[in-house]
Image (cartoon, rainbow, N blue to C red):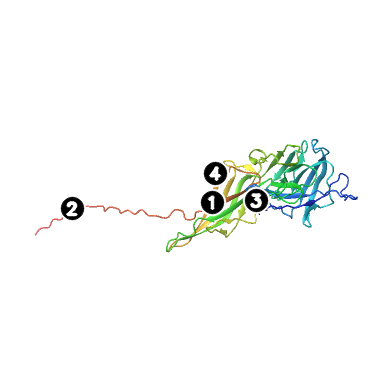
Amino acid sequence: MKKLMMLAAIVSVALTSCTKDEPSGATQPEAISFEVGVHQNTTRANSEFDIGIQFGTYAYHSTTEAGHASVIYMNNVEIGYNDAVWQAVEGNYYWPKGNLDFVSYAPYGHTYQPTISGTDYTTLTYTGVDVSSVAGQTDLLYSDKAENFTANEIAANNGSGFGIGGYGFNGVPTLFHHALAKVSLKVKALYTTDGATPATTWTTKIKSITLKDIYSSGNLVMTTTNNYSTGTRTWAKPAGNVWAKDGNKTDKTWSVVPAGQTLTTDYVAYDVASNYYVLPQALETGVQKIVINYTIETDPVGGNNVITEHTYEMDLQNIAGAIASWQMGQSIVYNISIDPKGEEILFAPALENWDVVNSGDIQVKP
C-alpha cells in the first residue's frame, strides 16, 4: 500500500430493502459500485487498496435529499475483490429510489471495527483498541462519508483527476484513512574505520531496541456534518490528531541476540518484517522512551580487540528535531546513528624536574 499510484475498482453490489436477488423485467436497475483508494498522510496522495482485504460497508437511505439517511439499507455488508471487481461476498445490491449515504471500514468484521451512530449517522467511534494485542496490530481503516448518492459516480478523466473520488472507474468514492499511526526504525554506524594507515576499525552491533512506556489503548470519536449535497465528507479528527488514551502502557522490543545485527555506514531498516502500529498519542517528557542496547568491538592498531556493552536511553520527546506526537495516518521513521569512535586517546606528556640535592663541599688539597 506504499506505492504512490491511484487504483480504481468497481464493486458490483445490488441493493434492495427486502431482497438481494436480481429483479426481473426489461429494465435492469444499476448495481451499486465503489471506487476505492487509501489515503497516505505523508504524501497527500492516494495509493492502491489491497485486493486481499475485505471491507465492510453501511448504506443509509432517505427518500429525499433534505431528509437525509434514517434507514440502514446495507448493514455491514462484506465487500471482496472477485473477478476483477469489488462486489458483495453474498448477493447483489442495487440502487433504490431516493438517496444513499455510505460509510465503510476495513478489515471486514475486525475485533476493533468502528460503530456508526448519532443523528443521521454522523458519529464514528473506535472503542477499547489495544495495540499491544494481536488484533491491535492491524491497519485499521475508515472511509470518508459519501453522501446523497443516487447512482454510480462517473469517473471522467479531465486531466486533473477522476470524478469526485479521484480514483478512476465508476462508483461511490470510497477513500480509506488510517486510524492508527505506525513506527519503524532505521539504523547505521557513523564509522567503521578511522581511515588511517594502518587503521583502527570498529564493529557496531545492535542487540535490541525498545519503545518503552508507550500508551497502548484508547478510544477514538469523530463526527461529521451532513451538507445535503452529493459528495464526500471527512470526519473531524480529535485535537492534535491523537486518540483519547486510557492510561495503559506497553513496551515494544525488537531483539537481535546473541550475535546482534552488524551495522554499516548506510541506514538500513531494522526488523523490516515488523510494521508496528501505535496508538496516536502526544509524546510527554519522562514517559515514552527509546532504549538501545548495542556492542562496540574496537580493533586498534597493533593492539588487542576490545568489546564493550552499551545502553542508550532517551525520551522520545527530547530527540533533536523530534516530533511532538504520533498522529493518525502518520508513518513515523526514527533514524538512529551510533558513533563507535568516541574520543581519540591523546596524551599530555610532561617531564618532572630533577630534584637537586647538595651533599656538601669536597675539598681537594695538593
From the viewer's perspective, is residue 97 above or below residue 189? above
Q: Residue at x 67, y 46 (%)?
A: 180
Q: Few, some or many C-alpha atoms within 10 Å of disc 2 (few <14, some 14-19, many ≥20)?
A: few
- Residue 20 image offset from top left, x and y in percent: 86, 49
Whether residue 107 is visible to the viewer of this picture, yes or no, is no
Which residue corresponds to mark 4? 318
Spot the residue most to the right. Answer: 25
**Lower sequence index among marks 1 and 2:** 1
| Mark 1 residue element | strand
Task: Give yes or no for contact between labels 4 and 2 (Cβ–Cβ under 8 Å).
Answer: no
Q: Quadrant of residue 149?
A: top right
Whether residue 312 is visible to the viewer of this picture, yes or no, is yes
Q: Amino acid at mark 4?
A: Asn
- Residue 229 image offset from top left, x and y in percent: 75, 39
Task: Give yes or no for contact between labels 3 and 4 (Cβ–Cβ under 8 Å).
Answer: no
- Residue 143 image offset from top left, x and y in percent: 73, 45
Which residue corresponds to mark 1? 311
**Lower sequence index among marks 3 and 4:** 3
Compute the Cα span from label 1 to label 2. Answer: 63 Å
From the viewer's perspective, is residue 61 above or below residue 167? above
| Residue 171 as seen in the image, left or right of residue 193 | right
